[in-house]
Every structure is written in C-alpha cells, then in structure tokens.
Image (cartoon, helix red, strand yellow):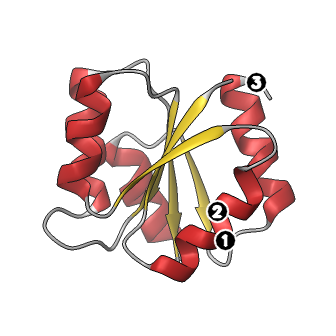
C-alpha cells in the first residue's frame, strides 16, 4: 500500500484527510514544513499532501526543499488560499498539483490516483 505524508498543522483538517485516505492509502502526519522535509528525507513516502500555511516552515518552502532533494516525490498543495496567484506560487515552488480547501474527497483521491495509482 502506498504511503502519503499529510503535512497539516490543523487537527480537524488532518482528521478529514485521514477519513478520505484511510481505505486506499497508508498515511503519516507532519505538523509543519520542517517535519515534512525530514520525513521525506527518511524515505518511504510516495506522495505529499502539503498545507501551505504552517508554522516553523511554510508549505512552499518545504516543497521547494523536497523537490530539490527528491524530484520524484509528487507534492499536492492543499490550501484555503484558492486564488490563481496562490496556485501559481505553489506550482513555482514545485507542487505537482493544487487542490483548494475545503477538499472534495473524490477530487483528492482522483488527483492522488493520477500521480501514484490507487
């Protein structure tokens, strides 16, 4: 089973993601961008769902570091900031895809399956 890293500092958003992912994927949690970078560095992560606004290190900075070290790991940005400029910033940082919050379970699973299979 594929492993997804959910980088999310908000508990209720994390719980929603576990509900969406639980049948199809294993998942781990990082509560900030720095933890996300460290967990991807350890290996075994097939995809990252990256919140953008997080403490310690934001999702854009974490994504840029992850993609520099591990270009093969897809990163999907998850953010409440759903303007086109936010999408462009996420893609420029190296995100493979962009999903606005609140996340539709179906759209999230489709985006993941497109990148790593389901």
Question: Does residue 103 appear to the left or right of 49 in the view shown?
Answer: right
Element assignment for label 3: loop
Residue 54 position within the rendered picture, expressed as x and y whole percent measured from the top left: 28, 72
Q: Which residue is mark 1?
A: 16
Residues at marks 3 and 1 touching, judged by CB atoms closer than 8 Å: no
**Residue at 44% across / 68% down in the picture?**
86
Residue 107 position within the rendered picture, expressed as x and y whole percent measured from the top left: 81, 56
How far apart are the two marked residues, 1 and 2, measured between alpha carbons? 4 Å
In this rendering, the answer to whether 68 lies above or below 30 is above
Residue 61 visible? The answer is no
Residue 17 visible? The answer is yes
Q: First in sequence: mark 3 or mark 1?
A: 1
Element assignment for label 1: helix
Residue 90 position within the rendered picture, expressed as x and y whole percent measured from the top left: 40, 55
Res. 30 image quadrant: bottom left
In this rendering, the answer to whether 19 lies above or below 61 is below
For disc 3, the neighbor class at 10 Å (few under 14, some 14 to 19, many from 20) is few
Element assignment for label 2: helix
Residue 16 position within the rendered picture, expressed as x and y whole percent measured from the top left: 67, 71
Residues at marks 1 and 2 touching, judged by CB atoms closer than 8 Å: yes
């Amino acid at each position: 089973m594929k492993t997804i890293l959910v980088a999310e500092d908000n508990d209720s958003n994390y719980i929603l993601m576990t509900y969406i992912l639980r049948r199809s994927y294993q998942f781990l949690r990082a509560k900030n961008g720095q933890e996300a970078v460290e967990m991807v560095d350890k290996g075994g992560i097939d995809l990252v769902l990256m919140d953008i606004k997080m403490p310690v290190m934001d999702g854009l900075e974490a994504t840029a570091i992850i993609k520099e070290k591990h270009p093969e790991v897809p990163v999907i940005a998850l953010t409440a900031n759903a303007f086109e400029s936010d999408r462009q910033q996420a893609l420029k940082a190296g995100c493979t895809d962009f999903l606005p919050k609140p996340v539709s379970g179906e759209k999230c699973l489709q985006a993941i399956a497109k990148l790593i299979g389901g």
